[in-house]
Amino acid sequence: NNGNSNNNNNNNNNNNNNEDWQDVISSDLTGIFVGISVCALCGIVFGIFWLSVMKRFASTIIKTMLWVNIGCWVVVAIVGIAYRELALAVIGVIIALFNALYAWCIWRRIAFSSALLSVASA
């Protein structure tokens, strides 16, 4: 008789545990679906906004990125000089010069590249 009552108690505990987990899972999934939906909506809105920025300012973005790249390597060289790390300073100067040469070589092609970006995103 004691064995039967223990089995019944265990079955009741298992049923209660299963119901508790179902409540937890169903409430957690609701928040997850809402979070995924909000993130997807934000991604779509930001994507549409960024595409319009790319269409309007394609040439400016390309030129800015070329100058920023050169500027970052100049900063690396300055940090190398400030910390008396000759290797870092030399690497920063060399890569900045390579990037400046690259920017000079492709500068006349930026108009064509911005036109391609505008057409591709239309």
Image (cartoon, rainbow, N blue to C red):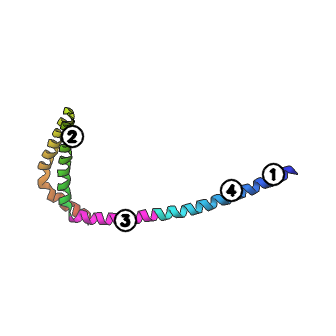
Secondary element under disc 2, as helix, strand or loop, is: helix
Q: Which residue is mark 1?
A: 6
Q: Which residue is mark 3?
A: 44
Q: Is residue 73 left or right of residue 2?
A: left
Q: Position of residue 9 (x, y in %)?
A: 78, 54
Which tag is nearer the camera, tag 4 or tag 2?
Answer: 2
Q: CA distance from mark 4 to mark 2?
A: 61 Å
Secondary element under disc 1, as helix, strand or loop, is: helix
Magenta span covers which residues? 36-56
Secondary element under disc 3, as helix, strand or loop, is: helix
Which tag is nearer the camera, tag 1 or tag 3?
Answer: 1
The answer to if 47 sits in the magenta stretch is: yes
Residue at x 57%, y 63% (from the top left corner) = 27
Question: Closer to the camera, 45 or 73?
Answer: 73
Q: Earlier in the sequence, mark 1 or mark 3?
A: 1
What's under tag 1, amino acid-wise?
Answer: Asn
Any mark on residue 17, and which? 4
The answer to if 50 sits in the magenta stretch is: yes
Q: Earlier in the sequence, mark 3 or mark 2?
A: 3
Q: Position of residue 65 (x, y in %)?
A: 20, 53
Answer with the quarter of the image where residue 61 lies.
bottom left
What is the crowding at mark 2: few (fewer than 14 residues within 10 Å), some, or many (at least 20)?
Answer: some
